[in-house]
Amino acid sequence: MVVTRKALLGVAAAAAMASTVALGVGGTAVAVGAPFGTPPARNIAPEADVSHHGHVSLWGTGLGIWLRSENRGPADLDGATVRLRISVPLAGRQQLPQECLQAGLTTVLCRTGTLHADGSEQRQLALELQLAGRPAEVVVRIDTVWNGGATDRNRQNSEHEVLAPATGDEYVF
């Protein structure tokens, strides 16, 4: 039997096409009997717009952070975790709300609980932290460190950096 180069290429092309149909585009399995061209099922991350707003106040060794978190959807979230990073160390163990924990010398993490997509379920936190020493100013960085795997395309309303001089005034974010 003589096999020409053209015939060999034809067989290779047919085998490649058969494996693409059997595996689907990108190597995912396609159900037997699925019409040709049917895209494989994909796990698409939900989208949410988590926002954090509030104010920060510094006086003596005390730092107050008042925070409101909400979600403008389109997907509901079972919860999110807000990270608060302070530019100066905290004074030892802190008295924190039940939904918060101290994650280091300068970091506090707080869970929000359920956040509905229509913004109706706002979560509020009030923290009064004690700082090591009496700084003239602090920088507080607020961001979402976890939101259940949802995509958030608008980070401008959930990532903030606030400079708070030791005046006792409220600095809004």
Image (tube, helix red, strand yellow):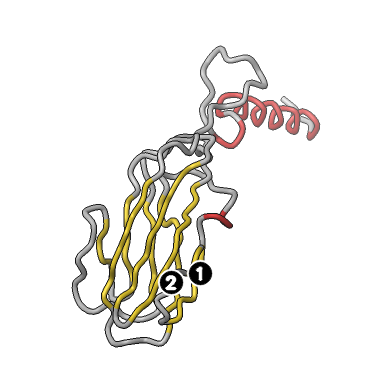
Q: Nearer the viewer, residue 56 or 117?
A: 56
Name the image quarter holding the N terminus. top right
Q: Check disc 1 and give the amino acid type.
A: Glu
Number of marks in picture:
2
The x and y percentages for residue 119 are: 48, 39
Name which residue lies at 44% across and 64% down.
55
The residue at the point 45 percent across, 36 percent down is: 120
For residue 18, which quarter of the picture?
top right
Tell me: 18 left or right of 83.
right
Q: Which residue is mark 2?
A: 140
Give 133 or 4, whichever is nearer the viewer: 133
Hey, what amino acid is under mark 2?
A: Val
Expressed as whole percent of the image width and height from the top left, the position of residue 50 reads 49, 47
Residue 135 location, x and y as percent?
Answer: 37, 86
Secondary structure of residue under mark 1: strand
Pointer 1: what residue? 161
Task: Name the one closer to the observer, 28 or 88.
Answer: 88
Q: Earlier in the sequence, mark 1 or mark 2?
A: 2
- Contact, CB < 8 Å: mark 1 with mark 2? yes
User: Vertically, is 67 above or below 13?
Assistant: below
Query: Which quadrant would residue 23 be assigned to in this image?
Result: top right
Percent position of residue 26, x then y: 59, 37
Q: Which residue is the extreme one toward the top?
A: 33
Q: Residue visible at 39% across and 56% down?
A: 82
Front position in the image: 80 or 30: 80
